[in-house]
Image: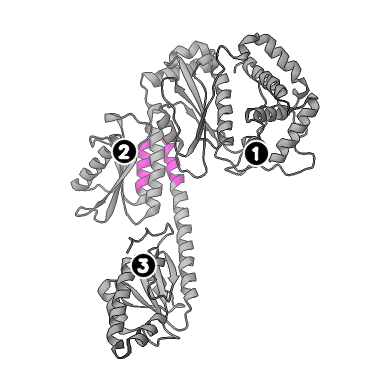
């Protein structure tokens, strides 16, 4: 028999909750009475329902299959039925079912005594379902209880998140977060170094055995191992408690590493979700950005000089690295990876989160990209949108979460990161970071359009065609060629994306967050304004050269 699958993620419903409902009239006849949790209900009259069980369910049957056993056994029906029911109970337990419900009528007047005895032998809770209670009523009661439990979990998570966020804003944020976490998980929390040194704790003080186990877990996650680890405690002051350790991302290795350790009820999933939120907050609170080492001091000094009017080139020596790579990232909808984990993977504290969805935009969607290209102006509020002439909908297509930007020293390798889509610029000096920022944004748009985890911007080499024309002449030519589009940033942006994506309607629509028909309408309008044939490869090449000249000729900043 294959091993049972893990129970579903739905909140468990105590069997005692169902037994307490007088409208159901359920009565337990055998098996353990404490700690029985139901995740869902399955009804089957098959002699062997095991292949169809996932584990954690209450299996309901009216015993129709027992009549077949009696008929086939003849004079030996009683003995055959005893053996059959013993095997039935054993297989049901092995499949991971939480309980067995036996319906009275229309086949049986009472629950067979052999079944009661078999369930007692194998530790399977057996519940009698009275004749007046349909199986659908039991199933409905379970799902109602699951819904109520899920609502309580979500309410608890929301309250805990608010409490943790408020604690993180207090004067001693790490200690305040540990205290808030201990209250909401009803357990012990601590911040430990790999050598077991404690840097703060809250909650009931554990005995030495629990403290030693916590130190071992801190060493596991702090030595470059997994991001989290768990241990179930037995024979300690907290029997039946799960001890979990979470590596705080963004920390250095060795003695400076930190781990959040939490002792809580192993059967309390919200507690572990709350601990995960606290781990992210503590990663930010205790990360390198909060440490006044030489690098952090240099970054702080550069910021002060910039705020006081210095030019980027003047503060470059304070940043340490002469060249920097700009990374733009968008989190995919199917991931739970945090921005802190990406910052740790990139190896930089210089990370800026995106602005989030614009007002009126649903989370998880991207609006149409109308950011003007260098050398153009933004449209005024009085200008009409450049949507399709037919009035077709231009609702934003579903997209990832808002962009995150990072500065990474040029010597550090940047690779794809699970759960994120990255656009990466080429290394650039501080004075040229605005251009590198645009290049990273363009690379990210290509990555999103092509469903690629990482795209790098490549600058043409010294023997490219752009090297044959003086930059000033190229810029002047581009402005003249694209003059009909100068007052329509959305058209320029659409043309730029459409050419960079080789004329693909679908990929351009994905990159801009608009409908493909809107892309077609815009390209048709562009061809008319420029009075040219965009199907001609020579025309496309000249327009691309002009657009790239505008990009290179834009003033930094």
- Please determine whether, in this image, residue 128 is positioned above or below residue 316: below
Instruction: Give residue 97's mark.
Output: 3
Side of 182 where 427 appears, left or right: right
- Residue 181 covered by magenta stretch: yes
Question: Is there CB contact under 8 Å for labels 3 and 2?
Answer: no
Q: Nearer the viewer, mark 2 or mark 1?
A: 1
Residue farthest to the bottom?
75
Residue found at x 39% / y 20%: 295
Counting from the top left corner in percent of width and height, residue 272 is at: 37, 49
- Please determine whether, in this image, residue 372 is positioned above or below residue 224: above
Going from N to C along the chain, the mark reached first, 2 or 1, is 2
Q: Quadrant of residue 484?
A: top right
Counting from the top left corner in percent of width and height, residue 56 is at: 38, 64
Structural crowding at the residue carrying mark 2, measured as other residues with C-alpha within 10 Å and reported as few (<14), some (14–19) or many (≥20):
many
Counting from the top left corner in percent of width and height, residue 465 is at: 62, 14
Q: Quadrant of residue 550?
A: top right
Query: In the depicted view, which residue is nearer to us: 409 or 557?
Result: 409
Instruction: Decide if residue 248 is in sight here.
Output: yes
Q: Secondary structure at mark 3?
A: loop
Query: In the depicted view, which residue is nearer to us: 87 or 328?
Result: 87
Q: Quadrant of the C terminus?
A: top right
Q: Which residue is mark 1?
A: 506
Q: Which residues are magenta?
A: 161-182
Structural crowding at the residue carrying mark 1, measured as other residues with C-alpha within 10 Å and reported as few (<14), some (14–19) or many (≥20):
some
Going from N to C along the chain, the mark reached first, 3 or 1, is 3
- Measured in 3D between alpha carbons, the distance from the residue under mark 3 to the one under mark 2, in whole angstroms, is 37 Å
Side of 166 where 480 appears, left or right: right
Query: In the depicted view, which residue is nearer to us: 189 or 129?
Result: 129
- Please determine whether, in this image, residue 548 is positioned above or below residue 362: above
Counting from the top left corner in percent of width and height, residue 69 is at: 35, 83
Q: Nearer the viewer, mark 3 or mark 2?
A: 3
């Amino acid at each position: 028999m294959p091993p049972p699958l893990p129970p579903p993620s739905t909140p468990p419903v105590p069997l005692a909750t169902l037994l307490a409902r007088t409208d159901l009239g359920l009565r337990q006849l055998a098996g353990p009475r404490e700690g029985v949790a139901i995740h869902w209900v399955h009804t089957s009259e098959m002699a062997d329902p095991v292949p169809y069980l996932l584990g954690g369910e209450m299996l309901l049957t009216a015993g129709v299959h027992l009549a077949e056993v009696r008929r086939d056994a003849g004079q030996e029906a009683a003995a055959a039925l005893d053996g059959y029911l013993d095997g039935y109970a054993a297989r049901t337990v092995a499949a991971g079912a939480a309980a067995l419900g036996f319906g009275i009528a229309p086949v049986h007047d009472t629950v067979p005594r052999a079944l009661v005895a078999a369930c007692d032998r194998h530790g399977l809770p057996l519940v009698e379902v009275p004749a007046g209670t349909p199986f659908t009523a039991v199933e409905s009661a379970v799902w109602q209880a699951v819904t109520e439990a899920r609502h309580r979990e979500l309410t608890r998570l929301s309250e805990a998140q608010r409490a943790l966020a408020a604690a993180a804003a207090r004067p001693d944020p790490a200690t305040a977060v540990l205290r808030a976490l201990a209250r909401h998980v009803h357990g012990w929390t601590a911040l430990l170094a790999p050598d077991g040194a404690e840097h703060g704790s809250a909650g009931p003080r554990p005995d030495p055995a629990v403290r030693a186990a916590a130190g071992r877990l801190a060493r596991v996650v702090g030595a470059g191992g997994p991001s989290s680890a768990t241990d179930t405690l037995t024979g300690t002051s907290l029997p039946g408690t799960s001890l979990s350790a979470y590596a705080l991302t963004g920390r250095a290795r060795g003695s400076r590493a930190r781990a959040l350790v939490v002792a809580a009820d192993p059967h309390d999933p919200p507690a572990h979700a709350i601990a995960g939120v606290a781990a992210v907050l503590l990663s930010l609170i205790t990360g390198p950005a909060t440490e006044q080492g030489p690098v952090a001091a240099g970054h702080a000094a550069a910021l002060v000089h910039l705020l006081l009017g210095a030019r980027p080139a003047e503060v470059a020596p304070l940043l340490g690295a002469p060249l920097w790579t700009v990374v733009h990232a968008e989190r995919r909808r199917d991931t739970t990876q945090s921005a802190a984990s990406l910052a740790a993977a990139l190896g930089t504290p210089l990370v800026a989160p995106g602005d989030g969805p614009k007002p009126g935009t649903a989370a998880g969607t991207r609006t149409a990209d109308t950011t003007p290209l260098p050398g153009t102006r933004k449209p005024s509020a009085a200008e009409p949108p450049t949507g399709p002439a037919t009035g077709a909908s231009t609702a934003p297509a579903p997209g990832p979460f808002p962009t995150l930007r990072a500065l990474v020293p040029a010597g550090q390798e940047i690779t794809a990161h699970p759960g994120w889509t990255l656009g990466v610029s080429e290394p650039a000096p501080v004075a040229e970071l605005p251009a590198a920022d645009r290049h990273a944004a363009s690379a990210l748009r290509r990555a999103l359009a092509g469903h690629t985890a990482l795209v790098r911007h490549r600058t043409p080499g010294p023997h490219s065609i752009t090297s044959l024309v003086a930059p000033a002449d190229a810029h002047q030519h581009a402005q003249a060629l694209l003059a009909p589009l100068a007052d329509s940033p959305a058209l320029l942006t659409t043309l730029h994306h459409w050419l960079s994506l080789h004329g693909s309607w679908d990929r351009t629509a994905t990159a801009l967050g608009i409908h493909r028909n809107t892309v077609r309408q815009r390209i048709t309008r562009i061809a008319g304004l420029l009075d040219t044939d965009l199907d001609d490869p020579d025309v496309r090449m000249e327009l691309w050269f002009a657009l790239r000249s505008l990009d290179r000729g834009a003033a930094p900043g």
